[in-house]
Image (spheres, rainbow, N blue to C red):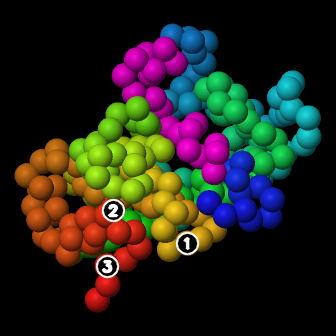
Amino acid sequence: MADVGGGQNSAASSERKGCPFASSSSGDAMAARATAVAEVLNPRNMMPNLPQTPHESQQSPLSKDRVTSNIPKAEEVGNWVYPSPQQFYHALLRKNKEAEADAMEAVVHVHNVTNDRTWEKILDWEQLHAHRCPTPSLLRFVGRSTDLSWGAWWSKRFSYRGEPFDRHDWFVDRCGASVVRYVIDYYDDPKAKDEHMQITIDARPAFDSLGSTVDRLRRPLWQVKRVWAALFGGHMAP
């Protein structure tokens, strides 16, 4: 990831350790619940209401401004709202991740842009169902950074990108008719089209149902481009 404004390298380092605003999987999730008995956790992301006050270890002030995402929130009016740099700092410390106050603005920017782009990729898939649900929304999400998907397993062995630095599962509400799980792998990618954010996002419906399997089969060109990008980088030549 290129250095933008002096903070992008630190932003990349923090992003590669997994999103602090996604609940952990399996044993990590159980440990988090055990250490958070007194906390009230949001079931949508398994995080408490994080403070906007400086942490005792913090050396410099951080912005408390929050940015509204492009992602509609299921069962509520409006869109998901991203954490402020101050809240993100608390989230990193809460999960024992490295937190550099000076880099937090850049870290939050990378986080927000990456999530908005993830939603755009999900909407590409949801176009297959636009006649029944023109306005899908995000119900909840979970972080599974230690669980390799089949795509990540394949990439680890055969692609120049190696394994992803993070994984999310997003649960999309199709206008109240059904909830569909998407698997998203995030890769460091030196051949990514955006030289300022060298991250490739691989988002697709999980093989949870016959409908999701059919959706995967309905986009054969996507499958070809996916394999091409994993092997050679960038976009498939025309």
Q: Are marks 1 and 3 in contact (CB under 8 Å)?
A: no
The answer to whether residue 16 of the structure is visible from this angle is yes
| Residue hosting label 3 | 236
Q: Residue at x 34, y 46 (%)?
A: 156
| Residue hosting label 1 | 194
Spatial CA distance of label 1 from label 3 is: 16 Å
Q: Looking at the rendering, which quadrant does residue 223 occupy?
A: bottom left
Q: Which element type, helix, strand or loop, lies under badge 3?
A: loop
Q: Which element type, helix, strand or loop, lies under badge 1?
A: loop
Which quadrant holds the C terminus? bottom left
Question: Of callouts 1 and 2, which one flags the residue occurring earlier in the amino acid sequence?
Answer: 1
Q: Could you say which disc has been placed on residue 43 in the image?
A: none
Task: Find the residue positioned furthest to the bottom.
Answer: 238
| Three-letter amino acid code at the position of disc 2 | Ala
Q: Height in image: 156 above or below 221?
A: above
Question: Of callouts 1 and 3, which one flags the residue occurring earlier in the amino acid sequence?
Answer: 1
Which quadrant holds the N terminus? bottom right
Residue 64 vs residue 205, the one in the foreground: 205
Residue 134: x, y in percent? 31, 71
Residue 35: x, y in percent? 57, 12
Mark 3, residues whose alpha carbon is within 10 Å: few (<14), some, or many (≥20)? few
| Three-letter amino acid code at the position of disc 1 | Asp
Q: Height in image: 133 above or below 15?
A: below
Q: Which residues are magenta?
A: 12-33
Mark 1, residues whose alpha carbon is within 10 Å: few (<14), some, or many (≥20)? some
User: Horizontal placement of 222 versus 202: left or right?
Assistant: left
| Residue hosting label 2 | 230
